[in-house]
């Protein structure tokens, strides 16, 4: 069982608002540097905004590679737990949220494209995305403690895809609110290399999708796909045929 430690910390009545803000947004980041950079450059439009974010945003992250493009309106939480490789593009209005107590956070490989409105959200878990992987608009990757999400190289993730590692509540005790009964972890999600997830695919906790698989649009993947290079679809997703 995984308890909602992050939620408990930020709703505690024994902590000041500044302390809660630091725990939710900053982690170990210097408050002054973070605030100045976000206030001045986060929503600055046009080529000037892109150029200034390219210069100043690396100051707040753990590590940023060469030639990284940051769109405007990006929400950044616990940036000292975020590693970004070379030639990465993070488009407008994305969320990079690496919050947690003892987690490693978010790692983006080289050549990753994070499209508009994508949410990468940690809640004491870790998210790892390999080289040359593309995340389509409005997708969600969520990792709760004990249910880390790993995405391999050359993965195509279409729009509105949900990869939710953890976050399932226990509910067997009728006299206790569901939110207080704790979370269940099944170990997370692993998407191996060269996988293509169609639009609006939902992958649940505990699932592994092996190399070279294609998942049809609007499918629910609630069990691992152990064979390589197959096309699967449906609710729940089932193997249909070999790719070639």
Image (cartoon, rainbow, N blue to C red):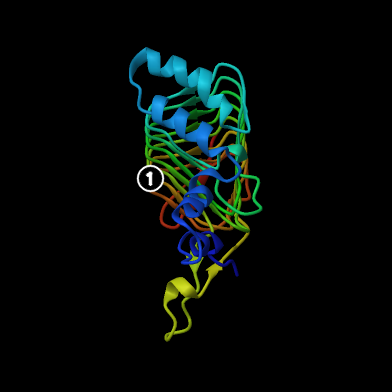
Looking at the rendering, in which quadrant would you find the C terminus? Answer: top right
Q: Quadrant of the N terminus?
A: bottom right
Q: Which of 197 and 42 is in front in this view?
A: 42
Res 194 quadrant in image: top right
Can you see residue 203?
no
| In the displayed structure image, the side of residue 185 where residue 41 appears, left or right | left
Instruction: Looking at this view, name the residue that lies furthest to the bottom.
Output: 175
Q: Residues within 10 Å of mark 1 (few under 14, many from 20)?
A: some
**Residue 6 seen from this side:** yes
Camera-nearest residue between 93 and 137: 93
Q: In the figure, 37 relative to 140: above or below?
A: above
Q: Which residue is drawn at 44% across and 31% down?
A: 38
Picture coordinates of residue 98 (x, y %)?
Answer: 55, 45
In the rendered image, the residue lying farthest to the left is 45
Using the image, determine if residue 124 lies above or below residue 139.
Answer: below
Give x and y (percent) for residue 145: 60, 57
Residue 154, position as x, y percentages in the image: 57, 30
Q: Name the residue under label 1.
A: 200
Total of numbered circles in the picture?
1
- Where is residue 113 shown, x and y percent of the image? 49, 27
Q: Is residue 43 above or below residue 195?
A: above
**Horizontal arrangement in the rendering, residue 161 relative to residue 81 (left or right):** left
Residue displayed at 55% across by 34% down: 155
**Which residue does the image show at 47% across and 84% down from the upper left?**
173
Give the SS element for disc 1: loop
Decide: is 165 above or below 13.
above
Question: Which residue is at the front of the view, 46 or 2?
Answer: 46
As rendered, which of 205 and 99 lies closer to the eye? 99
Question: Quadrant of the rendered structure where residue 131 is?
Answer: top right
């Amino acid at each position: 069982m995984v308890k909602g430690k992050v939620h408990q910390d930020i709703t505690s009545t024994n902590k000041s608002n500044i302390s809660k803000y630091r725990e939710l947004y900053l982690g170990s980041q210097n408050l002054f540097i973070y605030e100045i950079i976000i206030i001045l450059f986060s929503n600055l439009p046009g080529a000037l905004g892109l150029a200034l974010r390219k210069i100043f945003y690396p100051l707040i992250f753990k590590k940023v590679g060469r030639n990284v493009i940051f769109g405007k309106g990006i929400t950044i939480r616990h940036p000292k737990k975020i590693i970004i490789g070379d030639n990465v593009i993070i488009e407008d209005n994305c969320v990079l949220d690496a919050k947690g107590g003892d987690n490693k956070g978010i790692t983006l490989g080289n050549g990753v494209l994070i499209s508009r409105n994508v949410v990468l959200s940690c809640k004491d878990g870790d998210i790892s995305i390999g080289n040359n992987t593309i995340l389509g608009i409005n997708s969600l990757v969520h990792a709760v403690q004990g249910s880390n999400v790993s995405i391999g190289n050359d993965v195509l993730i279409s729009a509105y895809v949900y990869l939710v590692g953890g976050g399932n509540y226990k509910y067997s005790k009728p006299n206790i609110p569901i939110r207080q009964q704790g979370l269940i972890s099944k170990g997370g999600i692993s998407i191996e290399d060269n996988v293509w997830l169609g639009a609006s695919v939902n992958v649940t906790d505990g699932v592994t999708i092996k190399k070279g698989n294609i998942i049809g649009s609007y499918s629910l993947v609630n069990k691992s796909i152990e064979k390589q290079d197959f096309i699967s679809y449906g609710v729940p997703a089932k193997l249909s045929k070999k790719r070639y």
